[in-house]
Amino acid sequence: MFEGEKIRLRAYTRDDLPLARSFLNDVSVAEGMSSGIPFPLRPEDEEKWYNSLDPRSDKGYSFAIETKEDNTYLGGCGINSIDAKNHCATVGIFLGSEHCERGYGTDALRVLVDFCFNEVNLNKVRLVVFSFNKRAIRCYEKVGFKTEGVLRQEMYRGGSYHDTILMGLLRSEWEQSKKSSSK
C-alpha cells in the first residue's frame, strides 16, 4: 500500500467492484474518462476487468483509492501503456462524484506519480484530459502536469466539439517540486 496525506492506494478486491461500477456508470464520471459513448458497464464487464489484473505484470498497475481515516473506497487510479524502453507511461484516475473537491484526487495522483518515478523508474508520466473537465485540469496542474499539446475539437459530446488536452510531467520537474515544497 502507498499512502498520501488523506488517501491510501491499495490492490482492488472483489468487494470494490459494485461501487466502482456505480461510480463509472455515473454520467458525470464516465464522460470524463473516454471520448467514446459513455455506455453503462455490466457486472460481467467489471468482473472481466478484475480477473485480468495481474500484480506481477509490468504492463500496468491498477489501484483502489481509499481514505486513510476509515478505509472508504473512493475510486481508482492506474498506470497504463508503459513504454519500458523510453521510461514513460500514461496514468488515469477517477473518483465517485460525491468524493470530488475534497483533495482526495490530488493526493491520490501525487502518490501515484511518486510510485511512477520511484518504483517503476519512469522519466515521464502523461495523461489525456478533455477541455470541459476543468476540475481535473486544476488537479493535474496542482500536481505539476503541464500542457504539452491540444488536439482541437477531437471529441464530440453533448452537442458540441471539445478539445483533448495532452499533459505531461517529467521526473526532474517532480523532484524539483518536492525539493521546493520541503523548504
Image (cartoon, rainbow, N blue to C red):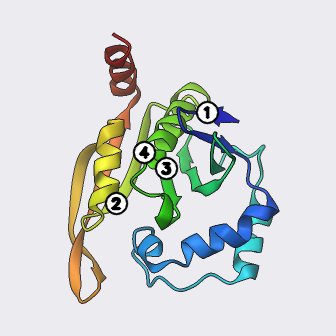
Instruction: In this rendered view, identify the residue nearer to me: 124 or 18.
Output: 18
Mark 1–mark 4 CB contact (< 8 Å): no
Q: Earlier in the sequence, mark 2 or mark 1?
A: 1
Instruction: In this rendered view, identify the residue nearer to me: 10 or 102.
Output: 102
* Residue type marked 1: Glu
Q: Where, by quadrant of the figure, is residue 100 drawn?
A: bottom left
Q: Quadrant of the N terminus?
A: top right
- The residue positioned 26% from the left and 60% from the top of the image is 134
Side of 19 relative to 90 (left or right):
right
Q: Quadrant of the C terminus?
A: top left
Residue 129 badge: 2
Real-space Cα separation, disc 2 to disc 1, in angstroms: 25 Å
Real-space Cα separation, disc 2 to disc 3, in angstroms: 11 Å
**SS of the residue under disc 3:** strand
Q: Where, by quadrant of the figure, is residue 168 drawn?
A: top left
Give the vertical position of 150 relative to 142 (above or below): below
